[in-house]
Amino acid sequence: MKLATYQDGSRDGQLVLVSRDLSQAHYASGIATRLQQVLDDWGFLSPQLETLYTDLNHGRLRHAFNFEPKRCLAPLPRAYQWLEASAYLSHEALLRRARGAELPDGFLSEPCLSQGGSDDFLGACEPARFASEAMGIDFVAELAVVTGDVERGVSAGEALEGVRLLMLANGWCLRQLAPAEQARGGGSLHSKPSASFSPVAVTPDELGASWREGRVDLSLQTMWNGRKVGHCEAGAEMSFHFGQLIAQAAKTRRLRAGSIVGSGAVSKQDGSHGYSSIAEKRAIETLDSGAAKTEYMKFGDSIRIEMKGRDGLSLFGAIDQDLLSLDEAAE
């Protein structure tokens, strides 16, 4: 099934079911008002939502309405946890090689994850606002999963059973702020502002055969200012699948329902299908010609991130955002 959260003036929004083709929606308020409620009681509430979802797709709901992505908050507007991984080692290797470094041995044996802020996410069509272009504003096109409860010390296979939903994410990064944070030996804080998520979160069964062994075997498409810059296969190049990422996150602690785990930038080793972050493009330029040429994002730019199924239809809807200055008035 496909789920979204509509703006209603509250922090957590209103849960809606969205039809498979993303054309129709229906409030789920007779069953649950918020997505976190469903995640907390998945075994009881999700079958009821599935029944409603089936009726929606067959046109049997009198009060269905046209789905509007612009009315969506992030599926989980705030979450108990947001972890971002480096699941595509080709991306991390490129960035390090461009600055004369190699991947540490530990990167090859187990996935690296970082803790991000999860108290305030951006909706898919909500403008992203930053104080200055000099911060090095970069998009990071990636996949993410939402988990149920996951016990400490689970295997990768067991961890996969905890995947409840999948989404697209834009893990915004302020590249010029990162070196100072790294030099102090701390984690990313100011360089990793609020992430954005697709308008719709989907259960794994909606992907059919494209959801295989913890990977999504489809292309992630990224358009920057209307020009396609990335068409990266999300499955083949993923060094660690989502089961491994979740198991790593749960190595020494439990994960609670509503935890979000992101893949990090989707990447292809030879860069032949474009890029999912400007930093990767700049790294390739540095390695090829000795200097980066592509500039980071400017105010007024737009970014669109989308994934289509094998039938050509959008699976999650698109992250479609404009980049604005903090001082620019909202329309």
Image: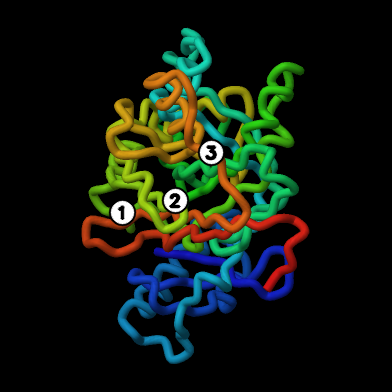
Position of residue 21 in the picture relative to residue 83 (left or right) = left
Position of residue 95 in the picture relative to residue 231 (left or right) = right
**Residue drawn at the location 47% of the way across and 44% of the way down:** 141
Q: Is residue 102 above or below residue 209?
A: above
Q: Is residue 186 visible?
A: yes
**Residue drawn at the location 73% of the way across and 70% of the way down:** 10
Q: Give the number of the mark in front: 3 or 2.
A: 3
Q: Which amino acid type corresponds to the residue marked 1 in the rendered image? A: Leu
Q: Earlier in the sequence, mark 2 or mark 1?
A: 2
Mark 3 and mark 2: Cα distance apart in space:
31 Å
Q: Position of residue 111 (x, y in %)?
A: 48, 23
Q: Find the residue positioned furthest to the top.
A: 105
The residue under label 3 is 295
Q: What secondary structure is marked by label 1?
A: helix
Q: What secondary structure is marked by label 2?
A: strand
**Residue 213: quarter of image:** top left
**Residue drawn at the location 62% of the way across and 33% of the way down:** 175
Q: Position of residue 303 (x, y in %)?
A: 49, 54
Mark 2 and mark 1: Cα distance apart in space:
9 Å
Q: Which mark is residue 166?
A: 2
Q: Which amino acid type corresponds to the residue marked 2 in the rendered image? A: Leu
Q: What secondary structure is marked by label 3?
A: loop
Q: Which mark is residue 207?
A: 1
Mark 3 and mark 1: Cα distance apart in space:
35 Å
Q: Earlier in the sequence, mark 3 or mark 2?
A: 2
Q: Earlier in the sequence, mark 3 or mark 1?
A: 1
Q: Position of residue 328 (x, y in %)?
A: 73, 62
Q: CB of mark 2 within 8 Å of CB of mark 1?
A: yes
Q: Which amino acid type corresponds to the residue marked 3 in the rendered image? A: Glu
